Image (spheres, rainbow, N blue to C red):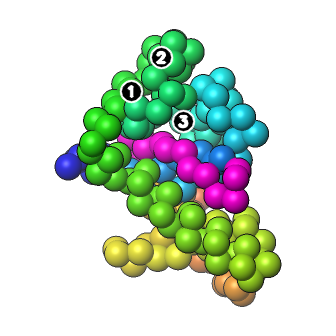
Amino acid sequence: MHDVPDHPWKKVGTDTFTIKRRDYLVTVDDFSQFIEVDYLPMSDSETVVYKLKTHFAHHGIPATLISDNGQQFTSQHFQQFTRAWNISHETSSPGNSKANGAAEAAVKTVMGMMKQCLKAKEDLYLGLLNIRNTPQGLNTSPAQRLMERRMKTLVPTNDPLLKPKQCSLDKDMTNVEQE
């Protein structure tokens, strides 16, 4: 069991999966359970590192990255990346996939969503948006826990619900003007 981090994107898990002969990378924040999904045109470590760098540029560099012992995550290239970006890389043992539980759960969630969307011929991105915006457990969604706001979907939503709770642009602008 891993401790839940005290803030978003401090610890993330990652894993790969295949559906319809296409490889994907899933990355999940342990705090918010916010999921990122990437198609992998090639499932080598260079492609995985590129996809992770993109997420880290959006959300920040995690202190800890947990993966399995797949070739993409144990290569020299991947080790150089985690050292250069000052990321503690932990791997789960081959017989203990639960050690990377958040990523394993995210893979199951995403695969289920993708199968449903493909069967119904619905947009996969809307399916992912709905996963990110659906309240879980604590009555908040992964998007709310990560960004402190709801995300706009096709379901009509009142504008005040889309605004972040922690900051106010008016307050921030007042502070800038006073400096």
Which segment is the magenta one? 7-22
Identified by mark 2, the residue type is Gln
| Callout 2 secondary element | helix
Q: Earlier in the sequence, mark 1 or mark 2?
A: 2
Residue 129: image location, x then y, percent: 65, 68
What residue is disc 1 on? Answer: 89
Front-most of 64 and 121?
121
Residue bearing the label numbered 3: 60
Callouts 1 and 2 close, C-beta under 8 Å: yes
Identify the mark nearer the N-term, 3 or 1.
Answer: 3
Q: What is the x, y in percent for residue 39?
A: 71, 47
Which residue extends farthest front? Answer: 21
Mark 3, Cα crowd under 10 Å, few <14 / some 14-19 / many 20+, is few
Q: CA distance from mark 1 to mark 2?
A: 8 Å
Q: In front: 101, or 31?
A: 101
Left/right of residue 96 with respect to residue 81 in the rendered view? left
User: Badge 1 local density, few (<14 within 10 Å), some, or many (20+)?
Assistant: many
Q: Residue furthest bottom?
A: 156
The quarter of the picture where residue 124 lies is: bottom right
